[in-house]
Image (cartoon, helix red, strand yellow):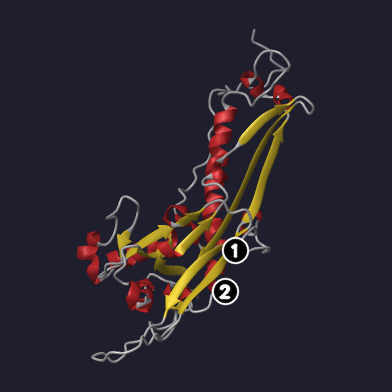
Amino acid sequence: MAFALPNLDNYVKTNEQMLIIKSFFTPKTATYMQKLTGVKSTIQVPSLTDDFYWGAGGTCGLLSASGDTTISARNLTVGKVKIEKSWCIATLEAKYTQLLLSPGSNYESLPGGIDEAFINFILGSQGEKVEIALWQSVLNGTAVDYTNKFDGLIEVIRASTGKIDANASAFMSPVTAITVSNIISVMQGIYQAIPAAILDKEDLRIFVGQDWSRLYQSALVNSNAAFNVNNYINTDATGEYYLMGTNVKIVPVPGLNGTNKAYALRTSNMFLGCDLESEEDEMKMWYSQDYDSVFMRMKFKLGTQISQPTEVVRFTL
């Protein structure tokens, strides 16, 4: 005799106490930028320059004033973003997820287990999208939804007058691709293009993608500098490290991954406009009796700008 089980599927134990979400990279760029809050639409980033001249001394007489003080501004326009979602919790009744539901037929919130996983996923994904948008966004561009609401730093710098292009014969042998064989000379070329006036500034940084940073570190290990490589990499808890042989720090940021672009500038020259600081991380959730569903909404504003284009070095292919 044996058991006959014609109508039974093989049993698979469910784990209703756990929902696993994917890993997200840690956003970095916003922590370096100067925050301008209370921006509903557009704010001016002012700049002052002055001309004055040395005259001949050793004489008396009337004041002889010379030179003009010029105040100009660059406009920072924020993009206005809204994210909305809704869930009918009753749809969970037909699957193993019913084990997460409270007794009865009225559900007024996301069930336990799902709510924490969902919030962690949304905040992780939002952090990634903001990081990428701060660099790669182009207003009304044709890219994905989170890179077309405002101009990111790449576009702001591209459209500016006076920026310094490092991929030029004045600073390096121009390249058309980045490889482990030329990355060291490319980074040195970027350094050579930095204006002397900002070389000694504590907040000067070279921003590169994490992919560039890994390539650069590999090149250092493979080069004759390998014996001293620990002086240049992994020297800072923030992930910053010194460009070999200089006092200038490299900052690997996820927002530049895959772009084959790098930028050298002072962090005091990088501006992030918003209405309320960290508003992009604020989430509102509520239950609607009218729709018998749980709703979520996030609303925020973001934009970028620089003040001194002539103090910005960019590398592009």
Residue at the disc numbered 2: 159
**Residue at the location (28% across, 64% down)?**
221
Rendered image quadrant of residue 243: bottom left
Distance in Å between CA atoms under marks 1 and 2: 10 Å
Kind of residue at badge 1 = Asp
Kind of residue at badge 2 = Ala
Residue at the disc numbered 1: 151
Using residue 123 as the reference point, say whether residue 227 is left or right of it: left
**Residue at the location (67% across, 46% down)?**
82
Q: Nearer the viewer, residue 96 or 284?
A: 284
Q: Position of residue 234 (x, y in %)?
A: 29, 55
Q: How many marks?
A: 2
Whether the residues at callouts 1 and 2 have beta carbons within 8 Å, the answer is: yes
Point out the tag, 1 or 2, that comes first from the N-terminus: 1
Q: Position of residue 233 (x, y in %)?
A: 29, 59
Q: Nearer the viewer, residue 130 or 217?
A: 130
Residue 162: which disc?
none
Q: Is residue 174 above or below residue 233?
A: below
* Mark 1: few/some/many CA within 10 Å (<14, 14-19, 20+): many
Q: Position of residue 48 (x, y in %)?
A: 45, 72
In the rendered image, which quarter contains the N terminus? top right
Q: Nearer the viewer, residue 157 or 77?
A: 77
Q: Is residue 177 visible?
A: no
Using residue 72 as the reference point, say whether residue 168 is left or right of it: left
- Element type where label 2 sits in the image: helix
